Amino acid sequence: MVKKVQKNKKDLEVVDVLSDFKNEKEVLLTKDGLKAMKEELEYLKTDGRKKVSERLKEAISFGDLSENSEYEEAKNEQGFIEGRISELEIKIKNAKIIKDTGTKVVSLGSKVTLVNLTKKGEEVVYTLVGSTEADPFNGKISNESPVGIALIDKAKNEKVKVLAPGGVVEYHIIKID
């Protein structure tokens, strides 16, 4: 994530840790994904900051900050929250909502029902989303994942082969929503 390291006049390193996010191209999201990001951002800016501020005040009241683990943990949490806020703001600014392209072929935003031919007809349902929104445990796979790449622009009743870590898996597309 560190993109630039420069030396200033006093030979101190200046590191731009957010440069990857600043230069990021568009972020592909569904309407629900963008809404969830905005809700998380609002929570972090209000309740998240407030809670970490209260933790910091409490930790400071314990005295000697040099050996105060509660203070260190609260400072680390504060850093995480501020970093996540910056990341979300940039992603929201660069968000592009996935448009509905119909159900003729698989595209971003499609909900696809597949039969796993490698596992004797096991049926799986995936929604194809941008990498930012991917959550495989909840059936949301990235368009950049091996399965996502194989499914893009395929039609109902087509078969696709995917090279997965466990070997080649073959799927039959039975439904596109």
Image (tube, rainbow, N blue to C red):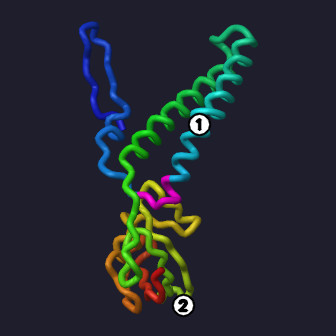
Magenta stretch?
29-34
Per the picture, the main secondary structure of the magenta-coloured stretch is helix
Q: At 48% across and 59% down in the image, what residue appears?
A: 31
Q: Is residue 110 left or right of residue 44?
A: left
Residue 2: where, in percent of width, then height?
A: 34, 34
Q: Position of residue 19 (x, y in %)?
A: 32, 35
**Quarter assignment of residue 165:** bottom left
The residue lying at 59 percent from left, 23 percent from top is 75
Residue 143 is drawn in which quadrant? Answer: bottom left
Q: Which residue is mark 1?
A: 44
Q: Which mark is residue 121?
A: 2
At label 2, which amino acid type do we have?
Gly
Name which quarter of the figure residue 7 lies in.
top left
Q: Earlier in the sequence, mark 2 or mark 1?
A: 1
Whether residue 52 is situated above or below residue 163 in the rendered picture: above
Secondary element at image label 1:
helix
Q: Residues within 10 Å of mark 2 (few under 14, many from 20)?
A: few
Label 2, secondary structure: give it: loop
What is the quadrant of the N terminus in the image?
top left
Residue at image position (40%, 89%) is 156
